[in-house]
Image (tube, helix red, strand yellow):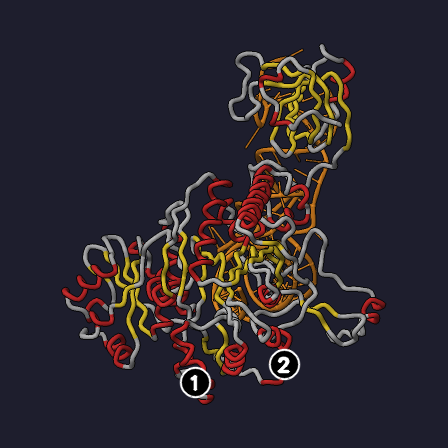
Amino acid sequence: MWRDKYCAEIKEDDIGKEIRLCGWVFRRRDHGGLIFIDLRDRTGIIQVVFSPEISEEMHKKAHSLRSEYVIAVKGTLKRRPEGTENPEIITGNIELWVKEFEILSTSKPLPFQLDEKTEVSEILRLKYRYLDLRREEMQRNFQLRHRITMAVRNFLDSKGFIEIETPMLTKSTPEGARDFLVPSRLNPGTFYALPQSPQLFKQILMISGFDRYFQIVRCFRDEDLRADRQPEFTQIDLEMSFVKPDHIIEIVEEMLFKCFKEVLGISIEIPFKRLTYEEAFNKYGSDKPDLRFGLEIQDISEVVKNSHFKVFVDIIERGGVVKAICGKGLASLSRGEIDKLVALAQSFGAKGLAWIKVKNGFESPIVKFFSEGILREISERVGVEEGDMILFVADTNSIACEVLGKLRLEIAERVAIKNEGFYFAWIVDFPLFEWDQDEKRFVSMHHPFTSPKDDDLEKLLNMPEEAFKDPYSNVKDLKAKAYDIVLNGYEIGGGSIRIHNAEIQEQIFKILGISEQEIKKRFGFFVEALKYGTPPHGGIALGLDRLVMIMTGADSLRDVIAFPKTQKAFCPLSEAPTEVDLKQLKDLHIKLDI
RNA sequence: GGGGUGGUAGUUCAGCACGGUUAGAACGCUUGCCUGUCACGCAAGAGGCCGCGGGUUCAAGUCCCGUCCACCCCGCCA
C-alpha cells in the first residue's frame, strides 16, 4: 500500500501518528524556508509541510514540485500552530510534516487552472477532460451520480425488480427518433441500430414472466443536441406486470423519495401533483411545465370579445382564442427591447405579440381599443402589478399556449423569479396520437405500444379507416394510459401501460398508417410474442442524466456525463467521429457517397 | 435546416461603434529572494497567425463578405 488514508479523511485523532498519503500537488506555497503543499485526492485536500529542520534533502527536493505532480509522502501528523488554522477546509486544524516523499509522476504545465476561480471554455475542458474531472465540482457530481444509481438499484432490488441487460446491437424501428446504425459485416447490406430505448425487449421480458425488470441502460438517439440532450444518455428503465398506472406512479414516487433522502438528505413531498396534459398545456403552454414560478397563461377571450380591437375580435370569431400572461417587471422595456420580444414570439410561431405596459396606468398603442373596465378585468385575471406588462397572443389555442409558454420561460429567466427546490409533477391523460403535418398522418405521442384508456378501447377498435387520414377526426381525442414525470421544467421520465393484446396493437399500427407488410417486417416478432400469453404490463423510463443534473444543480448534461459530446456530437477528447480505413469499409461492403 | 451570442498571450478577458506608433490586464509559466502560508508575498522575465480565407483602404485585431468552431434557442427529439 502506498497510503494509509485519503487526504481529507485524516482527523485530529491521528495527531502524533506517522501517516502515508498519496495525491496530486494542488497548490504550492514555497517560502524558501518552509514549503507548504495542498495535497489533493478525491476526498479533498490536506496541507503537507516540508521543513529543512525535518529533512534538508526532502526540503530541497520539494522545491521542484509543481502543479499536479503525483507524490507519495510519509510524515508525522501534527496539530497546526495556534493562529495558523484554516477554517475553510476540513483538515484545516492539522498538517503533515514530511519526513520522506517520492515523486511518482510529473506533469506538464496545465492548459488551464483547476481551481474554481475562472470559468474555462467547455471545448478545452472536454479536450482535457481528465484534468477537468479532477476539479472538486466534477468529483462531487460523479460521486453524487454514483450514490443516486446505488440508491435506485438498492430500492428496486428491495422491491423485487431484477436487472437484466438487453442488446445494444438491435433492430432499427421506423417510429421515433433517428437511429444510430451499425453495419453488419457478416450480413452485407444490413444494419443493426443502437437502441433508442429497450422498449420491446423489456415488454418481451414481461411476456417471459420476469414480472419486474429494471436496467440502468444506455440509449442512443441521433437527433440535434441541447443543453439537456446528448446523443447517448442513460435511462433508469423499469417494467412491471399486472399493474395499473397508479402502481408505476407510486413506485417511482417512493424511489425518488428514497433517492433524495439518501443522497441529498431532503424529504420531497409525495405524492406529486398531477396535471392532465390539457391542463398543463393550457396553463403553461408545455407538457413539461416549470412549476417553480407562477405566471400562468390566462384565457381572456371572453373579456376582450366585446372590445373594439378588431384583431382580437376577428380571431375569436374565427374560433381562435386570446390568451395572456404577466410579463413580470417588463414595463421598463424600451421600444426596441419590446420589438425584440415581439420578434422572439414570432420565432416561436406567433403572428404577433400585443402588449400593454402597467406603468402609471396602462400604456400601449392598443390601449384605446379597451374600456377601463376591460383593462381592469384583464389585469386582475393575468395578475399584473405596477411595473409589469401584459403580453397577449391571439391565435389558435395551441399556438397561443405554446408561444406564451415559451415567453413565460423567457420572462422567468430574465427576472429570476424561480423558487429554489424541487417541483415535481405527473402529466397524465396524454392524447394517444398527434397529427404529423409533414407526413400527413397520425403518429404516436408516446410510442406505438401505449395502451389507450379503457373508455376509449371500443372507440378505437371501431374507428373507420377514413378517420385515420383525417386530422380532425376523433382519432385525436383518444387518450393514452401514459404519464410523464416533470421536475423543474425538465421532462425526467415517461411511461405507460402497454398494449398486451395483438388485436389492439395491430389496430394502432393501422392508424399509424403502417402496412401489414411493414408491421410484419418491423414488429412481426413482437406482435407474434403478444399472442403467447402476455400479462398486462407497463413501465417507465427516467432520464438518469437529467435527474443527476437537477440534483447536482448543474445547468448542462455535460457536467454530469463523464465524456460528453459537443453540440455537433463531437468528442474533443478522443476526436470521434473520425474517418476509417478503406479496408474497414470494404469489410463492411460500404461505399461512401459524400 | 433556421435565429442569437462569442472566438485577441497557456487561461479568463479588455481593446473594435470612431481603422493610425511597440496589442494590454489579471491569473498561470520561468528565474531569483523569502520559516507559518493557505488564491502566500516581493522582484525580474518569457509568452500573440487578434479562429481561418478573401475584400475595402496608403493603412485592418478594429470595416465588409465568406467560412470553421463553441455555446444558447427554434425546428427535430421523450
Q: Quadrant of residue A286?
A: bottom left
Height in image: A113 above or below A8? below
**Chain letter, disc 1 residue:** A
Name the residue nearer the viewer: A30 or A397: A397
Q: Quadrant of residue A471?
A: bottom left
What residue appears at the point 77 percent right and 25 percent down from the top-left corner?
A102
Q: Residue furthest top?
A: A53
Q: Quadrant of the N terminus of chain A?
A: top right
Q: Residue furthest right?
A: A583
Q: Secondary structure at mark 2?
A: helix
**Residue A56: x %, y % from top left:** 76, 13
Height in image: A77 above or below A108? above
- N-terminal of the pair, mark 2 or mark 1, is 1
What residue appears at the point 79 percent right and 64 percent down from the top-left corner?
A580
Q: Secondary structure at mark 1?
A: loop
Evaluate whether label 2 is on the same chain as label 1.
yes
Mark 1 belongs to which amino acid?
A: Asn
Q: Residues within 10 Å of mark 1 (few under 14, many from 20)?
A: few
Name the residue nearer the viewer: A505 or A79: A505
- The span from disc 2 to disc 1 (Cα, nearest Å) is 22 Å
**Chain letter, disc 2 residue:** A
Asked if residue B48 lies left or right of residue A311, the reply is: right
Whether residue A197 can be seen here: no
Q: Residue furthest front?
A: A533
**Residue A438: x %, y % from top left:** 51, 80
**Residue A369: x %, y % from top left:** 19, 71
> In the rendered image, which residue does mark 2 sit on?
A520
- Determine which of the numbered discs, if any, sits on residue A529 in the image: none
> In the rendered image, which residue does mark 1 sit on?
A462
Mark 2 belongs to which amino acid?
A: Lys
What residue appears at the point 33 percent right and 61 percent down from the top-left corner?
A335
